[in-house]
């Protein structure tokens, strides 16, 4: 599938829940959150059917996300089915890490069970190594659980583990170097992500927005000029650098300040309530649950996908007229 601007779609991010056991300020507002009623969330069978249709059209990579995907019941049974779909070559999962070390059966952690079910790569969010700040940012005191979760992921032997850090001025600027050292000792890829305006506007202001360029300069003050890695791609939007004198790679995701950000976009998103979104940073979304539940054939669903891809914008609207109509937690980050 190719859109009007030459973006080749090969990657579908699948959100399986809007629920979460944390309350990150940049993702969901502190006010009481109402979750979607169960019947408004795609069943696993429905989600798998949509993935099959996407795979028929050339989608090769799936990333399961949320909300927090690991809070949804029977996730392992669902995950297990994805690699069996013809055409799917890569399976990843994004998580806050809090439940990775939990035992799913005696002696087996959730991380190991996910690996055994076919997950190849895992992204874990970690904004700080300070447990008090962690609790402030996420609204929950789960820092220890996340650190244990990361260890469990390392033991489980994923092909790739990435740590994702959302940049917040006044909150985790002092954590850049400690996080780099933390990732270095565990041989993990660390990525710094600019905060995007997908939550209430009070959270995203000039006072708390920390751009990637400033972050990179601060890191270079410590380590010297970072070495660009043109060849390293993870079919995502990050640009990667090597730290001089080290075998360590770090990435930057500058959705707000990198004007070329959207050029290599290969992605569509499926929300847990059955909306296909051609772009995270655009209000456009198309309800695939309706045709799915009213008996559409696979051919009709394929055509639905093709029509959505046709509407994929050239670039996101974050810098201009974006109106957050959904929180990140409801889109699937
Ligand atoms: C929405 S979360 C879902 C998966 C999982 N719960 C987690 O936290 O990793 C996916 C990613 O989106 C990031 N994220 C959430 N809100 C964001 C925002 N406003 N700007 C940038 N990244 C954001 C999170 O930090 C996380 O790395
Ligand atoms: S970023 Fe992840 S952990 Fe934090 S509230 Fe959003 S979904 Fe939950």
Image (spheres, rainbow, N blue to C red):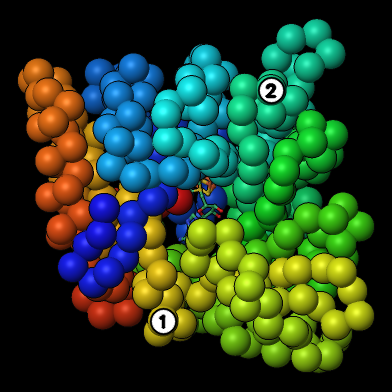
* Residue pointed to by mark 2: 116
Which residue sits at x=13%, y=31%? 299
User: Who is closer to the viewer here, 288 or 138?
Assistant: 288
User: Who is closer to the viewer here, 170 or 266?
Assistant: 266
* Residue pointed to by mark 1: 260
In this orientation, does residue 319 appear?
A: yes
Q: What element carries label 1?
A: loop
In this orientation, does residue 96 appear?
A: no
Which residue sits at x=51%, y=28%? 83
Can you tell which quarter of the image residue 203 is in? bottom left
User: Who is closer to the viewer here, 167 or 266?
Assistant: 266
Can you tell which quarter of the image residue 3 is in? bottom left
- The answer to whether 31 is drawn above or below residue 103 in the figure is below
Q: Is mark 2 on a helix, strand or loop?
A: helix
Mark 2: few, some, or many residues within 10 Å (few <14, many ≥20)? some
- The answer to whether 52 is drawn above or below residue 286 in the figure is above
User: Who is closer to the viewer here, 54 or 124?
Assistant: 54
What is the C-alpha distance between the residues marked 2 and 1? 37 Å
Residue with the most extreme top position: 106
């Amino acid at each position: 599938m190719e859109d009007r601007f030459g973006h080749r779609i090969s990657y579908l991010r699948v959100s399986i829940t809007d629920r979460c056991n944390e309350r990150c300020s940049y993702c969901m507002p502190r006010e009481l959150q109402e979750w979607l009623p169960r019947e408004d969330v795609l069943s696993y069978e429905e989600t798998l059917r949509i993935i099959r249709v996407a795979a028929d059209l050339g989608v090769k990579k799936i990333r399961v996300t949320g909300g927090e995907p690991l809070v949804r019941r029977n996730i392992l049974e669902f995950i297990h089915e994805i690699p069996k779909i013809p055409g799917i070559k890569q399976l990843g999962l994004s998580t806050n890490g809090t439940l990775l070390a939990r035992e799913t059966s005696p002696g087996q952690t959730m991380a190991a069970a996910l690996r055994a079910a076919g997950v190849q790569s895992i992204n874990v969010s970690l904004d700080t190594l300070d447990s008090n700040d962690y609790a402030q940012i996420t609204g929950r005191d789960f820092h220890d659980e996340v650190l244990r979760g990361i260890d469990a992921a390392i033991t489980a032997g994923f092909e790739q583990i990435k740590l994702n850090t959302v940049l917040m001025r006044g909150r985790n600027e002092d954590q850049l170097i400690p996080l780099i050292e933390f990732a270095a000792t565990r041989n993990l890829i660390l990525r710094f992500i600019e905060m995007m305006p997908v939550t209430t506007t009070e959270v995203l202001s000039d006072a708390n927005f920390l751009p990637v360029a400033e972050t990179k300069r601060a890191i270079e003050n410590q380590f010297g000029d970072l070495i660009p890695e043109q060849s390293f791609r993870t079919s995502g939007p990050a640009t990667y650098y090597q730290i001089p004198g080290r075998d360590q790679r770090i990435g930057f995701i500058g959705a707000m300040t990198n004007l070329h950000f959207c050029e290599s976009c290969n992605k569509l998103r499926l929300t847990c309530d059955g909306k296909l979104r051609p772009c995270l940073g655009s209000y456009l979304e198309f309800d695939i649950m309706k045709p799915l539940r009213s008996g559409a054939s696979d051919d009709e669903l394929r055509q639905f996908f093709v029509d959505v891809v046709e509407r994929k914008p050239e670039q996101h609207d974050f810098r201009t007229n974006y109106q957050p109509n959904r929180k990140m937690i409801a889109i699937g980050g």
